[in-house]
Amino acid sequence: MADVPIAVVSGANRGLGLEVSRQLADRGLGVVMGVRDLRKGEAAARFPGAALHPMFLDVADPESPARLAAEVRARFGRCDVLVNNAGIHYDTGNRASNPDWRVVREAFETNLFGAWRLAESFLPLMRERGRGRIVNVSSEAGSLASMGAGTPAYSTSKAALNALTRVLAAELADTGILVNAVCPGWVATDMGGAGGRPIPEGARGIVWAATLPDDGPTGGFFRTACRCRGEPESPAPNPESSEYPACRAASLRRRRT
Ligand code: NDP
């Protein structure tokens, strides 16, 4: 197994995390599917021929990411890709002016601290090989340039995740580890609901960022050209984020922050 690149995907038992796991396995990676319920993970991982390995992960538990990293080290000896996909609380009913602090805290615990702890836990394995890809699954809702009222816990936690992306990318410049944030657009998962685009399409940009070549961008916030939830049919270009080449190859640029 030591020759097979290993990807770790959080929240991999359903939605985008499951599809990203399948697409990465299709590309020949061994995929550790981080799941809170191993029975569900094992059911989700039943694809003939795919190297999918469900393992326990609760990103809201401060000890869990380090435990998973120790297990991955013992079993596979490497981690080439980390996809911080687990996310919660698209809190449409809430307002920042009248916050629900339980929801805000839970959103930050999972959407920001969970991703941060996973990066902290898996970075040593990437540094040892002098190569790695970290993809933070973010949202246009977390874009400072375009955010407005509503979904306060979700939007502020994703904005913080975008900030973490830039800080980590800058700290890791010239280590061979690329760190990017990707908005998958509005996708018809349990979180996105009906009306979003098909899950395989939503997963494409995440897989693109997870499999970037060594001279690929880092510190970027990428989105697809499709519409985000609540946006009109043709969204205005967002100066803060770039489209990924699955949609428009010309927009790809190398970025060092
Ligand atoms: P889903 O609600 O369909 O799936 C969320 C996944 O996260 C589930 O596997 C869930 O596991 C897991 N999860 C939640 N909390 C934890 C935790 N503490 N530890 C480990 N896993 C956890 O969401 P999507 O697939 O739609 O979303 C995936 C990512 O994409 C999220 O970060 C989301 O913010 C982002 N996104 C989604 C959009 C959309 O339109 N769908 C748009 C923009 C961004 P369990 O089954 O155990 O609950």
Image (cartoon, rainbow, N blue to C red):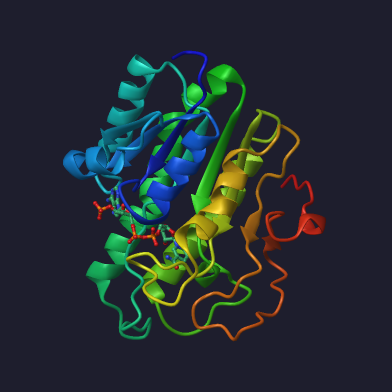
Above/below status of 91 relative to 44: below
Q: Residue at x 61, y 38 (%)?
A: 211
The spot of residue 71 in percent (x, y) is 30, 22
Above/below status of 138 relative to 71: below
Above/below status of 62 relative to 242: above
Q: Residue at x 38, y 19 (%)?
A: 73
- Judging depth in this view, the residue of 225 and 171 nearest the camera is 225
How many numbered marks are there? 0
Q: Image quarter for residue 10?
A: top left
Q: Is residue 85 visible?
A: no
Q: 203 left or right of 216? A: left
Q: Residue at x 41, y 54 (%)?
A: 112
- Ligand 1 position by quadrant: bottom left
Q: Is residue 104 visible?
A: yes
Q: Residue lying farthest front?
A: 48
Above/below status of 184 relative to 171: below
Q: Residue at x 61, y 71 (%)?
A: 226
Q: 143 left or right of 137? A: right
Q: Image quarter for residue 140?
A: bottom right
Q: 149 left or right of 66? A: right
Q: Residue lying farthest right?
A: 250
The spot of residue 64 in percent (x, y) is 26, 36
- Judging depth in this view, the residue of 208 and 182 nearest the camera is 208
The spot of residue 91 in percent (x, y) is 33, 75
Q: Image quarter for residue 233?
A: bottom right
Quadrant in the picture for the N terminus: top left
The spot of residue 134 in percent (x, y) is 54, 40
Q: 191 left or right of 40? A: right
